[in-house]
Image (tube, helix red, strand yellow):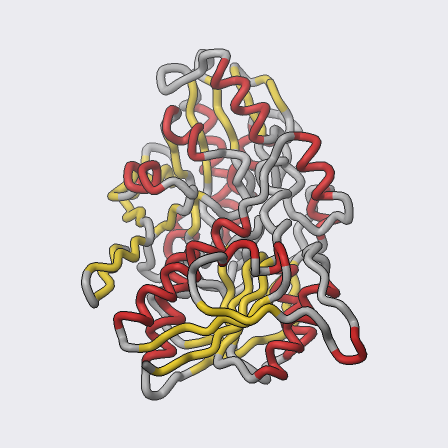
């Protein structure tokens, strides 16, 4: 049986800043902030899902995976029992590889994986982790992102962890192993937490080619769409029920709804409004769960989300405060201008709540509110990668 070598880097703290309302996980004390608030690590679990899929599919092609990864939470812990592996512990000059998830851990392990000569590096994290990998290896080796972070704007990530495993397996089993340069984009989290978005291009990484399983780069809303956004907001506000609670997710479109109400809502956070008043500003997942426990449900509340421009993610990117539990009990209203939908070039809206049942319920066709008296029926898809026998069935 042929052996393929794959490197894995897990940023264990990636994603912690989502449900906790911090819009990212780069803060030095984010682990303690999350722990004290009762938020658990999710990145290791999502990384394991990707490697489990990769291992299974490779075996069906007559290949066996040998994994090279880091100690503890940097990869070893989350891959126990899945495959044969080597844990890399020391860098050049005896520098130890830590497992805290900080930038130096990621960069050192990435360089070690290049030295070992793995066929491809998979890394679990968000845009900050992608930048660290870029700094360490540049375009010298193919890499693929497993999406586990908060704001995943870069084009180097698979759509979901399972899609990452499937993509890597298909690429490793292929004859040509084609790659393409794809963009690494990140944003200053200090400005982000202040409500100012400033995404910037930092470079490109060499990524296995598979357009059906890779996410697009986030696209900015064109200035020409500004009037359409304001018109949409005015129309939406006119139709709001004063007896209904509205959970407004992040984004310029939902922020325009808040502005039309005369409220100072959080552009990149989640706000709760009712009868024209701001009930909770910049809510985290616990605050929203408390409202659920207090009895708000489908008869009294609506979640309002807008997709990421160019990418189409409407659930699971930058709005993890709106958990699967909330989406299982409160209806979702998607709002987007015709221009934003057109920017997707026919690609569907994606949902990645982390709960297969919730994603299945949200999938199908949704009535997207696009303006005064207008809706567009648009496909909403989850990514399913089910291994059956020796084939993988995809549903998009």
| Residue 32 image offset from top left, x and y in percent | 73, 39
Q: Is residue 116 above or below residue 13?
A: below
| Residue 241 image offset from top left, x and y in percent | 42, 17
- Seen in the image, is 79 located left or right of residue 347? right
Q: Is residue 191 above or below residue 375?
A: below
Number of numbered discs on residues: 0
Residue ranking furthest to the left: 389
Front residue of this view, candidates 313 and 80: 80
- The structure residue drawn at horizontal position 64% and vertical position 43%, both measured from the top left corner, is 17
Front residue of this view, candidates 185 and 388: 388
Front residue of this view, candidates 142 and 183: 142
Q: Is residue 336 visible?
A: no
| Residue 325 image offset from top left, x and y in percent | 43, 29
Q: Is residue 259 visible?
A: yes
- Seen in the image, is 336 located left or right of residue 191? left
Q: Determine which quarter of the picture holds residue 116.
A: bottom right
Q: Is residue 247 above or below residue 44?
A: above
Q: Determine which quarter of the picture holds residue 167.
A: bottom left
Front residue of this view, candidates 383 and 165: 165
Q: Quadrant of the N terminus?
A: bottom left
- The structure residue drawn at horizontal position 45% and vertical position 12%, both measured from the top left corner, is 295
Q: Quadrant of the C terminus?
A: bottom left
- The structure residue drawn at horizontal position 38% and vertical position 52%, both measured from the top left corner, is 341
| Residue 71 image offset from top left, x and y in percent | 64, 62
Q: Determine which quarter of the picture holds residue 216.
A: bottom left
């Amino acid at each position: 049986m042929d052996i393929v070598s794959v490197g894995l880097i897990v940023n264990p703290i990636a994603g912690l800043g989502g449900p906790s309302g911090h819009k990212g996980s780069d803060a030095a004390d984010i682990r303690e902030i999350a722990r004290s608030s009762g938020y658990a690590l999710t990145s290791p679990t999502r990384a394991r899902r990707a490697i489990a899929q990769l291992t299974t599919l490779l075996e069906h092609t007559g290949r066996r995976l040998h994994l090279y990864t880091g100690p503890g939470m940097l990869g070893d812990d989350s891959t126990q029992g899945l495959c044969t592996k080597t844990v890399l512990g020391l860098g050049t000059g005896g520098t130890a590889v830590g497992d805290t998830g900080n930038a130096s851990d990621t960069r050192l392990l990435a360089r070690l994986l290049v030295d070992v000569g793995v066929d491809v590096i998979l890394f679990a994290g968000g845009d900050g982790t992608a930048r660290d990998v870029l700094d360490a290896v540049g375009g010298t080796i193919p890499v693929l992102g497993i999406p586990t972070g908060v704001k995943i704007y870069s084009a180097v990530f698979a759509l979901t962890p399972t899609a990452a495993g499937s993509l890597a397996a298909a690429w490793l089993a292929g004859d040509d192993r084609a790659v393409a340069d794809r963009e690494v984009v990140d944003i200053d989290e200090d400005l982000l937490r202040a409500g100012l978005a400033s995404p910037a291009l930092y470079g490109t990484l060499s990524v296995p080619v598979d357009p059906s399983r890779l996410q697009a780069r986030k696209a900015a809303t064109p200035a020409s769409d500004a009037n359409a956004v304001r018109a949409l907001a005015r129309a939406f506000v006119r139709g709001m029920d004063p007896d209904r609670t509205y959970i407004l997710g992040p984004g310029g479109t939902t922020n325009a709804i808040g502005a039309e109400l005369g409220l100072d809502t959080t552009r990149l956070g989640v706000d709760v409004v009712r009868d024209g008043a701001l009930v909770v500003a910049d809510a985290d997942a616990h605050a929203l769960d408390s409202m659920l426990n207090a009895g708000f449900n489908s008869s009294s509340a609506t979640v309002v989300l807008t997709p990421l421009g160019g990418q189409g993610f409407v659930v699971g990117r930058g709005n993890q405060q709106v958990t699967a539990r909330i989406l299982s009990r409160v209806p979702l209203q998607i709002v987007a201008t015709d221009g934003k939908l057109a920017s997707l070039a026919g690609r569907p809206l994606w949902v990645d709540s982390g709960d297969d049942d919730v994603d299945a319920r949200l999938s199908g066709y949704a009535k997207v509110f696009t303006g005064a008296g207008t809706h567009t029926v648009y496909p909403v898809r989850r990514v399913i990668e089910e291994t059956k026998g020796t084939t993988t069935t995809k549903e998009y």
